[in-house]
């Protein structure tokens, strides 16, 4: 059986498939029409975030049995279309959680201490020590929205920085939050009003799209900071721009955008805004982890019928 690796994946994953006797073909950067022309040859498909598994592609996938996302988010995969065709969709939760959590903490510290601005200033042969007066995170309250795999690690790391952690997650329990050392809140508005720093760790769904909008930003503390390394479109970028320009928020950091790459959006002109190009899972360790997990799951499904981390029933 043949497996198509349509997005860049660590070689460790390819080797797992090959050792199992499967034919692994790495063909990245294909245009949608090119992918559609060849997809009928494959029993398995491994993607990251670039390849879009659309209804048109699924319709052309005459022999496809499994799609594995080497990562967590599956907003690039049409689950109903796959389910209707009898194709199992899997992801690899937890394999890049530590990487995303560490980036979140890094963005929070960089935001608080003007690290990117200080670097740019020095590289421009300036010495703006007084201008770049920062803030300490110790003793501050961090509001965590979503305490799944990534949010849970962020909560633990933040406590190591002597932060008080409060959490909101309608799918979690007070006991889960307490096990993390966090105070559990059932009211998102209360969390917003109490947080000095707000970090988001939820998938993008119909319920979470534009979760942090103009109305909710108005409920946040004056001078609070916002960090999002989850998914683009959870934060209303225009509302965020207005909040940064008005001084309602002291700063914000995004690793994700509604449109990627975002181009010359208004946020880029804000002095109190920092950003990274969707680097949440971009560590060597995380890439090996997700490649190995995705390959093992595809191997086991095609050869044994075992479905781990399946997101649909077929």
Image (tube, helix red, strand yellow):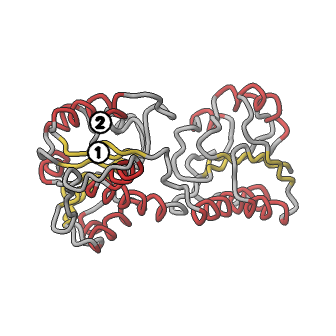
Which residue is label 2 attached to? 270
- Asked whether the residues under the numbered discs 2 and 1 touch, taking CB atoms below 8 Å apart as contact, a structural biologist would say yes
Classed neighbour count for the residue bearing mark 1: other residues with Cα under 10 Å, few (<14), some (14–19), many (≥20): many
**272 or 10: nearer the eye?**
272
Q: Residue at x 84, y 61 (%)?
A: 18
Please name the residue shown 64% across and 63% down the image.
Answer: 288
Is 132 on the left-hand or right-hand side of 16? left
Task: Give the distance between the C-alpha atoms of the residues marked 2 and 1, in whole angstroms.
Answer: 10 Å
Residue, x 70% and y 30% (percent of image)? 57
Residue at the spot of label 1: 252
Q: Position of residue 44 (x, y in %)?
A: 76, 47
**On the picture, is 27 further left or further right than 139?**
right
Residue 169 in sight in this render: no
In the rendered image, the vertical position of residue 190 relative to residue 153, given as above or below: above
Graded by Cα atoms within 10 Å as few (under 14), some (14 to 19) or many (20 or more), the crowding at tag 2 reads some
Count of labels shown?
2
Q: Nearer the viewer, residue 218 or 294?
A: 218
Q: Secondary structure at mark 1?
A: strand
Residue 87 makes an appearance in the image: yes
């Amino acid at each position: 059986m043949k497996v198509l690796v349509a997005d860049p994946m660590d070689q460790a994953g390819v080797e797992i498939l090959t050792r199992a006797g499967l034919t692994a073909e790495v063909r990245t950067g294909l245009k949608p029409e090119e992918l559609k022309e060849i997809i009928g040859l494959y029993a398995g498909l491994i993607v990251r975030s670039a390849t879009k598994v659309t209804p048109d592609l699924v319709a052309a996938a005459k022999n496809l049995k499994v799609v594995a996302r080497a990562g967590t988010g599956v907003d690039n995969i049409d689950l109903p279309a796959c389910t209707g065709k009898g194709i199992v969709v899997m992801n690899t939760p937890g394999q890049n959680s530590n990487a995303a959590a560490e980036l979140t903490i890094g963005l929070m510290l960089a935001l608080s201490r003007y690290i990117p601005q200080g670097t740019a200033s020095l590289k421009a042969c300036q010495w703006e020590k007084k201008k770049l007066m920062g803030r300490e995170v110790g003793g501050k309250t961090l509001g965590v929205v979503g305490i799944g795999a990534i949010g849970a690690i962020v909560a633990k790391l933040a406590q190591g920085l002597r932060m008080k952690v409060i959490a909101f997650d309608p799918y979690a329990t007070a006991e889960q939050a307490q096990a993390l050392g966090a105070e559990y809140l059932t009211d998102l508005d209360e969390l917003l009003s109490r947080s000095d720093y707000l970090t988001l760790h939820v998938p993008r769904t119909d319920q979470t799209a534009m979760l942090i909008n103009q109305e909710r930003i108005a409920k946040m503390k004056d001078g609070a900071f916002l960090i999002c390394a989850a998914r683009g479109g959870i934060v209303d970028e225009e509302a965020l721009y207005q909040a940064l320009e008005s001084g309602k928020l002291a700063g914000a950091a995004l690793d994700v955008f509604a449109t990627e790459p975002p181009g010359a959006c208004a946020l880029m002109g804000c002095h109190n805004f920092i950003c990274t190009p969707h680097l949440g899972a971009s560590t060597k360790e995380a890439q090996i982890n997700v490649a190995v997990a995705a390959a093992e799951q595809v191997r086991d499904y095609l050869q044994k019928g075992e479905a781990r981390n399946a997101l649909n029933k077929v």
